[in-house]
Image (tube, coloured by chain):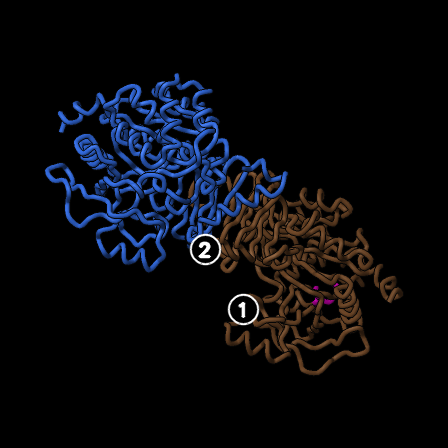
Chain colours: A blue, B brown
Amino acid sequence: MEDLIINNSRMVYAVIMAGGVGTRFWPKSRKSNPKQFLNLFGETSMIQQTAERLQGFVEEKQVVVVTNKDYVSLVEKQLPSIEPMNIIGEPVARNTAPCIASAAALLNKKDPESVMIVLPADHRIGSPNEFKRVLETAVETAKTQESLVTIGIKPNRPETGYGYIHRTSDVKIKNLNHPVYRVQEFTEKPDQETAQEFFESGDYLWNSGIFIWKTSTILDAFKEHLPEIFIEAEKLKKSDFKTEDVRRFYEACPPISIDYGIMEKAEKVHVIPGDFDWNDVGSWTAVHELSDKESEENSTDKGKAIYVNSSGNYISTNGKKLVAFAGVDNVALVETDDAILVVNLDQAQDVKEIVEKLKENEETKKYL
Amino acid sequence: MEDLIINNSRMVYAVIMAGGVGTRFWPKSRKSNPKQFLNLFGETSMIQQTAERLQGFVEEKQVVVVTNKDYVSLVEKQLPSIEPMNIIGEPVARNTAPCIASAAALLNKKDPESVMIVLPADHRIGSPNEFKRVLETAVETAKTQESLVTIGIKPNRPETGYGYIHRTSDVKIKNLNHPVYRVQEFTEKPDQETAQEFFESGDYLWNSGIFIWKTSTILDAFKEHLPEIFIEAEKLKKSDFKTEDVRRFYEACPPISIDYGIMEKAEKVHVIPGDFDWNDVGSWTAVHELSDKESEENSTDKGKAIYVNSSGNYISTNGKKLVAFAGVDNVALVETDDAILVVNLDQAQDVKEIVEKLKENEETKKYL
């Protein structure tokens, strides 16, 4: 296994996608400081944990971050080891396909044999060693098969909030750390009944948004399925990747997701089931679930809290005030220097509606 | 009616009992600043509203306040028109009987014909004009009958949290503004079934803790039913009511309530049904009920609040932070400079348990 890592390390790059402007973590997440830069767990941010997780597998100088141009300085501050040239600042949001094409162009120019691992910046992985073992299998597959490889998460519930990947029943590549399947179909978020069928069938995996491929393979796929973006990527590849070059690229690209633009259409797509305690941390509910608990399933992130006849709660403050809960269940209180959120953890998606309300008048826009 | 007020005014005194150290309004109420001194409604405190309510009926210089000695300066600050000599600072809490005896001694010395109206400092009355009309009847009764008079509140629900007064079915004194009944019995807080019977019978009234009597009448009652306190009251009456005199009186008195010590035993007790939108404001639930509501029965006391899919909530902050509720029903959030309470309004009595927990360790005692 050591050998494999050493052999890979020269050509394996990681591309961390950090462009999100997530609103589900208000009041901590703000336009100027979205989820991936927050310390939702412990003393480091989601993007810092994403980078840390790669240590020993991808060299720091081979990590690329694609983010909104407004967050470039945040990335530089939180990940000082990343080469400044490896931070791509998107001037406009164009969804994941252009994001991936720009990183593929950058890396393919450096090394035509390069393999890139595409990772969202804001997921949580509980078993990082198993995660790396799965990535090893994925990299090996991407290199030897020249296919598009994705990691599918083994579902532990009939979740309706994720897309699913229908894999073949039989293993297509053996003798690696993990079985490798072909993808039959990518599916959109299912209704409850369909999700239940998927969950019970055993042949469906959650779409994790983690992809592994040779940069040459994905660029070929762009050429076939998204030629408009491919042409721009070729131009970008010939440029010096200066701000102006990147701006021209993004402004020329249509907004489209890699799933819809390529993965759902490509012929040769492999999926590797991953079982490494993955969570996309989609809401305060997930943060509560993933946090250490006191008695009665209460969880206090920071600050002093007292609970009386209360269970299943989450409290995160700026540490200045004592918080007391009495007779309250399944509620999160999140306090920042200028706001306090109290949200029912059974309907944490309502936080999005709060953010919409804040946009409605001038007086409250400062809280966005 | 005008004549009645003018005739009464010379001899009618009010005694506001303000010794409570209530813990049910934490984090706003603190040992150093209990409920009666809080602005729970609007821009004045409960005790200020109690005094304001008497205007036009009792002259300011004829208002006496009995409170804990630690709150004397708070009373002086909040009620600057009260004569300093009319503020009695209790050195130790001895319940209501000694409190009333000390005020009776003070007023009986000033005027042997004086009538005193005893009022809790922390109740809310929605119809102050009707309240004054009831007091007129009570004063007239106390003067002409030389009886102990109490105001009974017409119940609007089978409440188990109050004591009840069983009145006679027939009116004993007519030709006044209101019917006056004799009291058959004072009862303790009933169980649910008994409360339902009381409520349906029509002959039961809530014990409001509001009493009206001539000072000579109540001192005679002390002589008969609580001679130990009567002897001390006689000594106090002969003194100059200096701090040392008051200290000696309270330290010599046993702790006992006026209800248990006198009202339940006295022969000649009258009750007048009062229907003036009375509330003893026993918890944050009552504050929510009595506050102005926005849509969905939400109520924001101070500060800016946003509600999404939330109803029946109460928010009171120090005005510095935006508070947002999402998917939360029947919850109060109360913020002070050093603490935040989140309490289910269906079990607001749990606040007492929080205060008990705060007492448990040194670190949290500063929040008491």
Residue at the right extreme of this rendering: B3
Which residue bears the numbered disc 1? B160
Residue type indicated by callout 2: Gly
In front of the other: A314 or B171: A314
CB contact under 8 Å: marks 2 and 1:
no
Say which quarter of the image contains residue B282.
Answer: bottom right
Residue at the top extreme of this rendering: A240
Residue type indicated by callout 1: Thr
Residue drawn 39% across the image and 52% down it: A311
Residue drawn 47% across the image and 29% down it: A251
Say which quarter of the image contains residue B174.
Answer: bottom right
Up-down: is B339 above or below A93? below
| Residue A28 on the magenta segment | no
- Measured as percent of width and height from the top left, residue B40 is found at 64, 51
Residue at disc 1, secondary structure: loop
- The quadrant the N terminus of chain B occupies is bottom right
Magenta region: B215-220
- Measured as percent of width and height from the top left, residue A181 is found at 19, 43
* Marked residue chain, label 1: B
In front of the other: B41 or A202: A202
Q: Report the Cα–Cα distance between label 2 and label 1.
A: 20 Å
The 10 Å Cα crowd at callout 2, few under 14, some 14 to 19, many 20 or more, is: many
* Marked residue chain, label 2: A
- Measured as percent of width and height from the top left, residue A224 is found at 31, 35
Which residue bears the numbered disc 2? A327
Residue at disc 2, secondary structure: loop
In front of the other: A104 or B68: A104
Say which quarter of the image contains residue A114.
Answer: top left
Most prominent secondary structure in the magenta stretch?
A: helix
